[in-house]
Image (cartoon, rainbow, N blue to C red):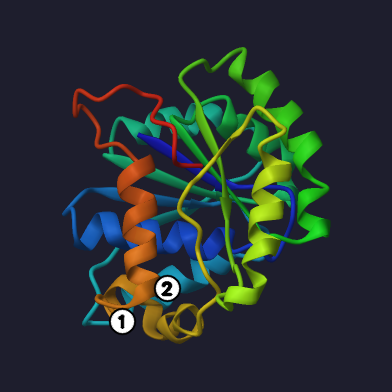
Amino acid sequence: MIVLVGGEKGGSGKSCIAQNLAAMLTVEENASVLIVDCDVQGTTVDWIQSRNNNPDATTIDCVQLNGKIRNQLLGYSSQYEYVIVDCGAQDTLALRSTLSTADVALLPMRPKRRDLKTLSHLDEMVHSCKMVNQQLSAHIVFTQCPSQPNQQSRVNEAKTMADLYDISVAEQILHERHIYDDSEEGGLSVIEKEPKGKAAEELRALFSTLVNKPNSGMTDNVVSFA
C-alpha cells in the first residue's frame, strides 16, 4: 500500500504525520515499512537517521526521491507492506506522481486562512490524478488544532469550508500538543514516547480509520482518512 502524506502548504505537519504513521505501523502492527522523503529540507531523513542510531528504537527504512517517482514507488510497493511518502509543494512533480499512484492520500491542513486558500488548487490536482488512479482515497486532515473550547468554532468553520470541495474531510482532527516536538528527540514517535497520551489516541483513531491493511479484504475507499 502506498500512502501519501502531502500538500501545498508548509508547516502543516506533513513530516510529523508521516513519521508517526511509519512508527505506528512498524511498532504496533509489526509491518514492513519504507518511508520516502521528497522534501528538499530532508526533515524525515534527519529523523530516520536519529532513529536508526537509537538502540532503543525499531529501525525503519528510508530513501530520498524527487521528480517523476511513480515507477519507483510501484517497485517499492512490491517489497514493503507500506510505502509512506512525505511530499510537499517544493516538488509538485513528485506530489502529482504520488497522487497518481497512491492508495491513500493524507492531506494535512491547519484551520487557518492561508492553508484553506490551497483547497481549490489541491482539489483540482486530486481530481485530475483520480482520472488515472481511480483507487485513490484522498482526505483532508486538520492538524495543529487549538484545544481550547472557545476556539472550536475555528475548526468547525474550516471543516465547513473544506466540505465545499470533493476531497473527503477526516472526522478525526489532531490537536496542537508539545509531545510532537518532545518525541522527535532520538527519532521517536508520539506513540512510543507517550503511548497512552491524547496525541497517541488521536493518531491511532485517524490511522485505524483511514489506512487499511493490505490484502485485508476491505474496499480501497474508506471515507475518513486523508
In the image, what residue type sits under mark 2? Answer: Gln
- Label 1 sits on a secondary structure element that is helix
The quadrant where residue 225 appears: top left
Among numbered discs 1 and 2, the one appearing first in the sequence:
2
- Quickly name the residue at label 2: 49
- Label 2 sits on a secondary structure element that is helix
* Foreground pick, 133 / 51: 133
Location of residue 217 in the rendering, given as x and y in whole percent from the top left corner = 19, 23
* Foreground pick, 165 / 35: 165
Location of residue 226 in the rendering, given as x and y in whole percent from the top left corner = 51, 42
Location of residue 219 in the rendering, given as x and y in whole percent from the top left corner = 31, 21
Q: Is residue 69 left or right of residue 103?
A: right
How far apart are labels 1 and 2 at the CA level?
Answer: 18 Å
Q: Residue at x 66, y 32 (%)?
A: 96
Q: Residue at x 66, y 37 (%)?
A: 163
Q: Which mark is residue 193?
A: 1
The quadrant where residue 215 appears: top left
Q: Residue at x 24, y 58 (%)?
A: 26
* Foreground pick, 48 / 122: 122
